[in-house]
Image (cartoon, helix red, strand yellow):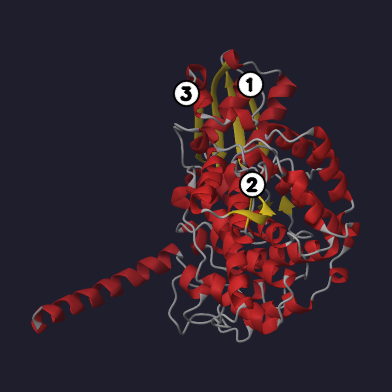
Amino acid sequence: MLRRDFGKLALGAMASTALIKPVLAARGSGAVSANDFPKTPGLTDYVGRFVATTKYEDIPPEVIELGKKSILDGLGLALAGSRAETGTIGRQYLKNMGVCGGQATIAGSALKTSPRFAAFVNGVSIHADDFDDTQLSAAKDRVYGLLVHPTVPVLPAILALSAQRNISGKEFMLAYHLGVEVECKIAEAISPRHYQDGFHSTGTCGAFGSAAASAKLVGFDQSKILNTFGLVASQSGGLRENFGTMTKPFQAGHAAESGVVSADLVALGWTAAQQILEADRGFFHAFGGSYDPAAIMDRLGKPWTFASPGVSLKPYPSGSLTHPAMTELMRLIEANNVQPDQVEKLDCGANHNMTTTLLHHQPKTGLEAKFSMEFCLAILLLKRKAGLGEFSEKVVHRPEVQEMIRKINFYVDPEAESAGFDKMTSILKIHLKDGRMITGRADFAKGSPANPMTFEEAATKFRGCAEYAGCSKSKAEKIISLLRTLDSVPDVDVLGPLLSVEKG
């Protein structure tokens, strides 16, 4: 290239940059210059110190009990998700690589493998049906906490690492809660641009949860914990464009796996940057453009995320943004005995982040249906249920389902938009053929901290997932009993045989 041509290109780039900066500012993209980026020296060090020094006794008893419900939920979903096509492919992948025969259990099967691959495959299974728990948010500019699913990056990692290590229930829960706390506070701090522009925060922020939990479980000191964070940050990834495909649960499974990989390598002497969160070329700057230091610095465990703002358990195997509308629609259907042939149209108003995240308005597969408000509402109107069996390609293509989908109007409603993105405000208007209109509104769903599931309700969900996976009733009841008193279990490796299912 001639120098004069290069000069023209450079001048053009400078002019473009001058035009782009105001646009980015107007969009609130979170893109900032190095001078404007928050300076929080010692942030990663603070997070590492929290992981290194926190003891089981430091966790409030009510937080421990909330965690038990999410752990039970995650185990059930590992079983149920093993029946998904991703479970079959994942097990075949292990066989093809010749890595079967280790110590860590692949839930829902008779296979065992190394902790790394068990964390990956079980993580994929937990997220395969989009039935796993969801982080809430404390800020109105967050899309429901940036939609981190807190258990899936953490539980498979520590479950795999606990194989034949004599890890007690208390040690297990301590690592779990530290992982959840770290990933959720990171997600709460990063600029909303991170999620809005396409990152899948379970795959990105969740990797830090796996790293924190893995490092704690294997007994790392603070320096090794910081190396684990630095290494896992370079494996962090995931894009929302893959929602409604097999790659969404892959991203969650990879987050779980990457924490184990990082801990394994650091244990052998691997090093990494020790200020990976706050550095100018670190995680917050590269992945979010900016972040809110006040949302994480000196905030870990103050309060614990499980205590406030809380974590939701899902009542339906679909994207969590569908659940308030589904909960309210079921209430309206039952209260008014609405029959499918009575429905002329159903309007569902929401904020724009919900309409763009639930992006499959004309789903063609069961996975796409999980991210289709239209399908989720249509199937409730038709069958008054939306369980694991409803989200299949066969059901999606039924003529009556397609006809009902066409009657759903999913749109951005100004009232829902103004309610804030920390809520999932859903405004329903059922238009009946006789001229009547039935209306309802919900900000949160069953299973949210505002309308929580009891342990027994979570156990009922677990039983359904275990049955779906072919797990015997006796094994399912033993798992439930173990989780009720997990703090007194001397070795959590007893869960391995209980999660094993001979078929598959």
Work out whether residue 424 can be spotted.
Answer: no
Q: Secondary structure at mark 3?
A: loop
Between 388 and 160, the residue placed more toward the observer is 160
Work out whether 451 lies above or below 240. Answer: above
In the displayed structure, does residue 353 sit left or right of residue 68?
left
Q: Amino acid at mark 2?
A: Leu
Work out whether 291 lies above or below 168. Answer: below
Between 252 and 363, the residue placed more toward the observer is 252
Which residue position holds label 1? 383
Q: Secondary structure at mark 2?
A: loop
Q: Amino acid at mark 3?
A: His
Q: Identify which residue is drawn at 47% across, 33% down.
A: 365
Q: Identify which residue is drawn at 52% across, 65% down.
A: 236
- Viewer-nearest of labels 1 and 2? 2
Q: Quadrant of the C terminus?
A: top right
Q: Amino acid at mark 1?
A: Lys
Residue 179 placement: quadrant: bottom right
- Viewer-nearest of labels 3 and 2? 2
Work out whether 338 lies above or below 354. Answer: above
Work out whether residue 320 can be spotted.
Answer: yes
Which mark, residue 111?
A: 2
Q: Identify which residue is drawn at 64% across, 77% down.
A: 267
**First in sequence: mark 3 vs mark 2:** 2
Determine contact: label 3, label 2, CB under 8 Å: no
Residue 437 placement: quadrant: top right
**First in sequence: mark 1 vs mark 2:** 2
x and y percentages locating residue 40 in the rendered image: 60, 83
Which residue position holds label 3? 397
Q: Secondary structure at mark 1?
A: helix
Q: Identify which residue is drawn at 78% across, 67% down.
A: 303
- Report how far apart the C-alphas of labels 1 and 2 lie in the structure: 36 Å
